[in-house]
Amino acid sequence: MHSFSFDIETVPDVDFGRDYFDLDGLADDDVATAMMFKRQQQTGSDFLPLHLQRIVAISVTFRTADTFKVWTLGDEESNEAEIVQRFFDGIERYTPDLVSWNGSGFDLPVLHYRALKHGVQAPRYWEMGENDRDFKWNNYMSRFHWRHVDLMDVLAGFQPRGRASLDQMAVLLGFPGKLGMSGDKVWETFRAGGIREIRDYCETDVLNTWLVFLRFEFMRGNLDAKDLEREFALVRETLATMDQPHLNEFLAAWPA
């Protein structure tokens, strides 16, 4: 069994905004401000629609056999098309179970739009049982199948009023939660050239997601107490071996 937990970070698609709203000559900051102002006027919120979000980072954890890994796709110079292609290539190669926090409501729709924009093919992801009967009753698209577990949606009983934030749920369960960074700071950080900080933050988000998922698997009975401790130990050992500042900070904030 292969399992990916995943998370994306996005910024306004200022290239679209410049073209669509006829804003030639304006700097990226001004274009983004104009886009968010128009959105505020239309809806009362400056949060841009999902198809106008440009992906700047995709982080994943990968659990398979006796190994656990966490990384961010591509490198700091990779463009959006490359990292989106890498995400769907991973699904094509491994057919993993996907784990997310609000992936159904945000991450996956954004990935759909950006894959469509960049001409990314993803036949395994879109399989519904036409070519592989195993996908008829367990595919990535159904809200009530297990091939993609959106923890926020599932734990809320599929009720919007029951939803919790990943940060608060992680802290509730004794995990680090967010460490000095949050989604509303990504655009500001990106403008300042902080793509590394964004990638590091994205990795800590997928780690929190994975740890919450392990507790969920324990609750479901798919792991017993020894299994759970073994999974936690594997994560700790992996992060310690990687010896990166943001992962060391995560470990320090996660008491044994």
Image (cartoon, grey):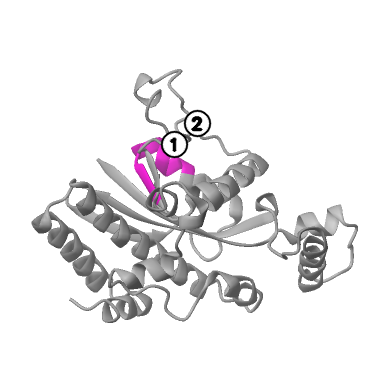
Q: Is residue 37 left or right of residue 92?
A: right
Q: List the residue tagged with mark 1.
A: 140
What type is the residue that disc 1 sits on? Tyr
Left or right of residue 41: residue 219: left
Instruction: Give the magenta part as a residue range.
Output: 88-99
Q: Position of residue 146 (x, y in %)?
A: 35, 38
| Residue at point 16%, 58% (across, down) | 228
For the residues labelled 1 and 2, the Cα–Cα distance comes to 7 Å
Task: Examine the rendered structure and indicate whether residue 199 appears above or below residue 79.
Answer: below
- The reply to whether dot 1 and dot 2 touch (C-beta < 8 Å) is yes
Which comes sooner in the sequence, label 1 or label 2? 2
Residue 81 x/y as whole percent: 59, 49
- Residue 90 in the magenta stretch? The answer is yes
> Can the viewer see residue 256 in this picture?
yes
Q: Which mark is residue 250?
A: none
Q: Quadrant of the C terminus?
A: bottom left
Instruction: Look at the image and say whether residue 202 sits in the magenta stretch.
Output: no
Quarter of the image holding residue 44? bottom right
- Indicate whether 2 appears above or below 206: above
Q: Quadrant of the N terminus?
A: top left
Q: Residue 211, located in which quarter of the rendered image? A: bottom left
Q: Which mark is residue 126?
A: 2
Task: Choose mark 1 or mark 2, whichever is in front.
Answer: 1
